[in-house]
Amino acid sequence: MKFGIATFVTDEGIRPGPLGRALEERGFDSVFLAEHSHIPTSRESPYPGGGDLPRVYYRTLDPFVALTAMAGTTTGLLLGTGIALLPQRDIIHTAKQTASLDLVSGGRLLFGVGAGWNREEMRNHGVDPRTRGPLMTEQLHALRALWTEDEAEFHGDHLDVERSFSWPKPVRTPPIYLGGESEAALNRLAEVGDGWLPRGHTSFDEIRRVRDDLAERGKPDVPTTVFGGEPDPDVVAGYAEAGVERVTFLLPTLPESETLAKLDELAKVVTASG
């Protein structure tokens, strides 16, 4: 079992460089950073977790800037987005950002993506919430082309990229981890994903069911990383039995000294989970 951290890096917490160094020193193999471009004050979309939207959602740093800072203070830490809100992003800029990060980090990007839940946020980017899923599927096909082909193009119902040169290319094609547990998300995973990023509330039985279903669709042993799993050795053991490759623990956004103390607590769970 591998262990990582999922967190929101904001202007009010530990800076990304020291955080990356601290994670690597404590034996975590990866970090996954959340993304929100902005939060419209209308607040029409209810927070999926219930209650008021936590303050960290308003204040996230750009994940690619933060992960680049982490790359500079680490040597092996895998650098993940958890999750990048792909339908809100220009896919050509995203291809360049992801490939650039993968290049400067020596091939350490894990690209976690999702369709998003904040409808007013996506509308501000010119995205119709009703078609964000099909758009995202096309974006992922286009992204692979831009990463891997010298002259890339894509033509779909929601996205059109004319034949283009796009550099840099990544060191290796970054694995695409699909977030979400809905039928649409899982169909997208079967079509174009490399790994699955289910949230921590997903049951062991559901993880087994999905992995069996993917195997029947020709995708056996899909790498599975639990996002925000409970830091309990018994729970970790249950994930391992369900075929999970990696568990990430949610790290609260705190000043540096408090963050380091919390990481020490989580590192003890990793040791106990042996």
Image (cartoon, helix red, strand yellow):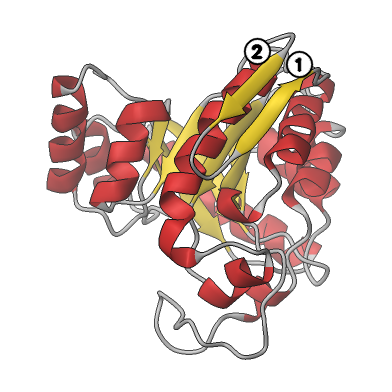
Q: Residue at x 68, y 64 (%)?
A: 125
Residue that badge 2 annotates: 148
Residue 28 in sight? no
Asked if 41 appears above or below 273 in the picture, the reply is below
Quadrant including the C terminus:
top left
Q: Which residue is mark 1?
A: 169
Could you tell whether 113 is left or right of 143 in the image? left
Residue 64 in sight from this viewpoint: yes
Q: Position of residue 262 (x, y in %)?
A: 61, 60
Q: Are marks 2 and 1 in contact (CB under 8 Å)?
A: yes
- Residue 178: x and y in percent read 43, 40
**Residue 248 higher or lower than 76, as above or below:** below
Question: Which residue is found at the position 46% from the left and 79% from the top?
Answer: 47
Q: Is residue 189 left or right of residue 176?
A: left
Q: Secondary structure at mark 1?
A: loop
Q: Quadrant of residue 77?
A: top right
Q: Who comes first in sequence, dot 2 or dot 1?
A: 2
Q: Amino acid at mark 2?
A: Thr
Quadrant for the N terminus in the image: top left
Q: Residue placed farthest to the top in the image?
A: 150
Q: Residue at x 79, y 31 (%)?
A: 96
On screen, 11 above or below 84? below
Please provide percent x and percent y for residue 241.
Answer: 19, 32
User: Disc 1 marks which amino acid?
Assistant: Lys
Foreground residue, 59 or 168?
A: 168
Q: How many marks?
A: 2
Mark 1, other Cα within 10 Å: few <14 / some 14–19 / many ≥20: some
Q: Callout 2: helix, strand or loop?
A: helix
